[in-house]
Image (spheres, rainbow, N blue to C red):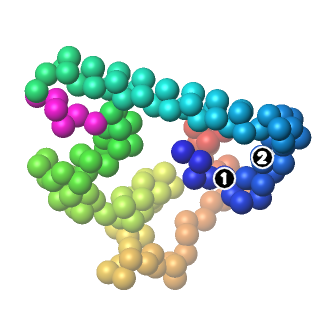
C-alpha cells in the first residue's frame, strides 16, 4: 500500500504528526486510524465474499485484481490458447516500420529495404528535388 514512501518521507510524516497532534494524543490517533483501516479491510473482504457467493460456483476462482485491464491482458498473453505468441513472434516491427517510412516518403520499399543484418543501406543517394519544388505536405503532421 505504501510501497513508494521513502525513509525521508516517512520521517517527515512522523514529525508532522507529532507537531499536529502532539506527543500525548498521537498514540490514540494511531489506534483510531489502525482500527478504521481494519474495519475498512473487513468490510471489503465481506463484500468480496458476498459477491463471490452471489456469482455462484463457476466463479469460485474469480479474482478482483483481474478486473484491472493490464492484469487481464497480461494473463491472456501468458495463456497461449489463442496462439498469440505465434502471432507476436511472426510480427517483425523493424520491417513494418521501414515499410511505413518508405510509404510516407514515397520510396519503393525494395530500394531501401533493410539487409539481412537489419540495417538500411545509407550509401544510396536520396532523391533530390528541384530548388523551387516544395517538400510533400503532410496534413496529419501539422
Can residue 21 be seen by looking at this rendering?
A: yes
Crowding at mark 1 (Cα within 10 Å: few <14, some 14-19, many 20+): few
User: Which residue was labeled with disc 2?
Assistant: 13
Residue positioned 42% across, 23% down in the render: 43
Crowding at mark 2 (Cα within 10 Å: few <14, some 14-19, many 20+): few
Residue positioned 36% across, 82% down in the render: 117
Looking at the rendered image, the disc whose residue lies closer to the viewer, 1 or 2, is 2
Report the residue that reaches farthest toward the front.
Answer: 24
Percent coordinates x, y for residue 19 in the rendering = 89, 40
Queried whether the magenta region covers residue 112, the answer comes back as no
Above or below — where is 136 with respect to 111? above
State the separation of the CA atoms marked 1 and 2: 10 Å
Residue positioned 60% across, 65% down in the render: 128
Q: Are marks 1 and 2 in contact (CB under 8 Å)?
A: yes
Q: Secondary structure at mark 2?
A: helix
Above or below — where is 62 with respect to 90? above
Compared across the picture, whether 71 is left or right of 8 comes to left
Percent coordinates x, y for residue 135 in the rendering = 64, 51
Percent coordinates x, y for residue 136 in the rendering = 60, 47
Image quarter of the N terminus: top right
Which mark is on residue 5? 1
Per the rendered image, the range of residues in magenta is 58-63
Camera-side residue of 123 and 140: 140
Q: Secondary structure at mark 1?
A: loop
Above or below — where is 71 with respect to 53? below
Q: Reading the chain from its start, which is encountered first: label 1 or label 2?
A: 1
Compared across the picture, whether 97 is left or right of 81 comes to right
Residue positioned 16% across, 32% down in the render: 60
Amino acid at each position: 500500500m505504501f510501497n513508494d514512501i521513502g525513509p525521508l518521507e516517512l520521517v517527515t510524516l512522523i514529525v508532522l504528526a507529532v507537531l499536529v497532534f502532539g506527543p500525548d494524543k498521537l498514540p490514540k490517533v494511531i489506534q483510531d486510524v489502525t482500527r478504521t483501516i481494519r474495519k475498512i479491510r473487513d468490510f471489503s473482504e465481506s463484500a468480496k465474499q458476498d459477491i463471490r457467493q452471489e456469482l455462484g460456483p463457476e466463479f469460485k476462482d474469480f479474482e478482483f485484481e483481474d478486473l484491472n485491464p493490464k492484469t487481464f491482458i497480461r494473463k491472456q498473453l501468458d495463456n497461449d490458447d489463442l496462439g498469440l505468441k505465434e502471432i507476436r513472434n511472426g510480427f517483425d516491427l523493424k520491417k513494418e516500420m521501414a515499410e511505413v517510412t518508405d510509404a510516407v516518403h514515397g520510396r519503393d520499399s525494395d530500394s531501401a529495404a533493410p539487409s539481412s543484418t537489419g540495417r538500411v543501406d545509407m550509401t544510396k543517394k536520396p532523391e533530390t528535388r528541384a530548388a523551387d519544388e516544395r517538400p510533400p505536405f503532410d496534413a496529419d503532421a501539422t
